[in-house]
Image (spheres, rainbow, N blue to C red):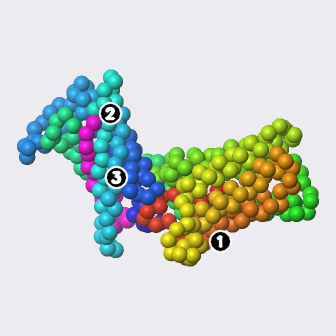
């Protein structure tokens, strides 16, 4: 994870009027989305045609300029290349939209987010916004980061979160290996044990679903959907464990896993580039892990419908998928054994956002 990403604020307070601005960056750090709601409407300095004038943003005018109602902002991020020891400046360019009384008010805005090279210095942000109905008008913006966040928010943006991701991947692998071993031995694990397994899966997947919607930089929608469908799948299997013989439950759970795997295949992309070696790069492990889960889900679905005895094959494919997901969850900061070891060919870089949760 790039050091500047670790210091990237997700919430700002406007120094002029005390407004709050929440930003969510795309996983590739090329796009962003946010929301903005001011707390007051004081005087604002407006620059137009190189002239400055003071205007009072009364409630009616504040609505007109998107300064009182919730505004949505969306745009692109320009990530520069800097030398070590230099300040890092992100250029955020986009548009704001405010919906009020059935009308849309909108216009362009620009923000320069400066992350000082000195880790003790506080990032700053400044820029302007303008209204499409007032061409040439620019209202200055100045912001400071709001670091008064929750302990949970701080945790999911720390290296401890990555360690939790890798540790969970290890535990998931251990549980799946236990199921495979019982299948190979021809013995069914006790219902109580399976219930504990399912409850653990649901709890961890639920935790990461909350993290996805709390973190500054979210995974893609397809990735979140895939994890959510896995969570639903384990809920169904947990219900099946408690109520054995429920018609269609096993097939339904397997179908949820299959669709979730397809969603993850879309999210993680396919192999490509680098010839044959490109198929085995670390960044492709999540794709192949999802593919193994897809095949395993199909086998389990067929077994639940026709009783083809595919439990061993299905669990073998799931174990393979777990190994690949474990490898894919490691970063440069956190290796397979949770230490700060360099992991060849991968890790969270400048284009991967803040949180890498790859333990599906």
Of 121 and 265, the residue lying toward us: 265
Query: How far is mark 2 from mark 3, CA to CA?
Result: 19 Å
How many neighbours does mark 3 have within 10 angstroms: few (below 14), some (14-19), or many (20 or more)?
some
Between 260 and 80, the residue placed more toward the observer is 260
Magenta segment, which residues? 106-124
Q: Residue at x 64, y 58 (%)?
A: 290
Figure check: 214 above or below 316 = above
- Label 2: few (<14), some (14–19) or many (≥20) C-alpha neighbours in 10 Å: many
Counting residues from the N terminus, which is met first, the one under dot 2 or under dot 1? 2
Q: Are marks 2 and 3 in contact (CB under 8 Å)?
A: no
Mark toward the viewer: 1 or 3: 3
Q: Which residue is mark 1?
A: 337
Relative to 226, 300 lies left or right: right
> Outermost residue, top direction?
101
- Write down the residue under mark 3: 76
Image side of residue 203 versus residue 136, left or right: right
Q: Which residue is depicted at the point 25% across and 43% down?
A: 108
The residue labelled by disc 2 is 98
Q: Are marks 2 and 1 in contact (CB under 8 Å)?
A: no
N-terminal label among 1 and 3: 3
> Residue shown at 31%/40% (left/top)?
96
Residue 273: x, y in percent? 50, 71
User: How many discs mark residues in the rendered view?
Assistant: 3
């Amino acid at each position: 994870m790039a050091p500047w990403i670790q210091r990237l604020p997700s919430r700002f307070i406007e120094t002029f009027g005390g407004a709050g601005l929440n930003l969510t960056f795309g996983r590739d750090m090329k796009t962003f989305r946010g929301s903005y709601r001011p707390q007051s409407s004081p005087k604002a300095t407006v620059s137009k045609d190189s002239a400055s004038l003071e205007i009072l943003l009364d409630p009616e005018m504040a609505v007109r300029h998107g300064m009182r109602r919730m505004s949505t902002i969306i745009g692109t991020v320009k990530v520069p290349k800097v030398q070590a020891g230099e300040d890092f400046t992100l250029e955020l360019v986009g548009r704001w939209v405010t919906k009020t009384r059935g009308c849309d008010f909108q216009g362009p805005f620009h923000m320069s987010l400066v992350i000082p090279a000195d880790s003790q210095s506080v990032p700053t942000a400044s820029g302007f916004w303008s209204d499409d109905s007032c061409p040439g008008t620019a209202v200055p913006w100045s912001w400071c980061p709001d670091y008064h966040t929750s302990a949970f928010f701080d945790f999911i943006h720390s290296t401890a979160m990555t360690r939790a991701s890798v540790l969970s991947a290890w535990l998931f692998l251990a549980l799946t290996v236990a199921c495979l071993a019982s299948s190979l031995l021809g013995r069914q694990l006790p219902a109580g044990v399976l219930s504990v397994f399912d409850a653990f899966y649901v709890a961890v997947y639920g935790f990461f679903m909350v993290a996805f919607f709390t973190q500054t930089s979210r995974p893609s929608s397809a990735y979140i959907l895939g994890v959510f469908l896995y969570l639903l799948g384990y809920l169904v299997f947990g219900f099946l464990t408690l109520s054995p013989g429920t018609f269609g439950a096993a097939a339904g759970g397997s179908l949820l896993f299959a669709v979730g795997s397809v969603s993850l295949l879309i999210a993680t992309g396919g192999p490509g580039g680098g010839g044959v070696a490109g198929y085995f790069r670390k960044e492709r492990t999540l794709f192949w892990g999802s593919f193994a889960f897809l095949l395993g889900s199909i086998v389990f679905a067929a077994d639940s419908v026709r009783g083809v005895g595919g439990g061993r094959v299905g669990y073998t494919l799931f174990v393979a998928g777990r190994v690949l997901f474990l490898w894919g969850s490691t970063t440069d900061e956190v290796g397979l054994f949770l230490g700060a070891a360099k992991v060849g060919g991968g890790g969270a870089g400048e284009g991967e956002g803040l949180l890498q949760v790859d333990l599906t």
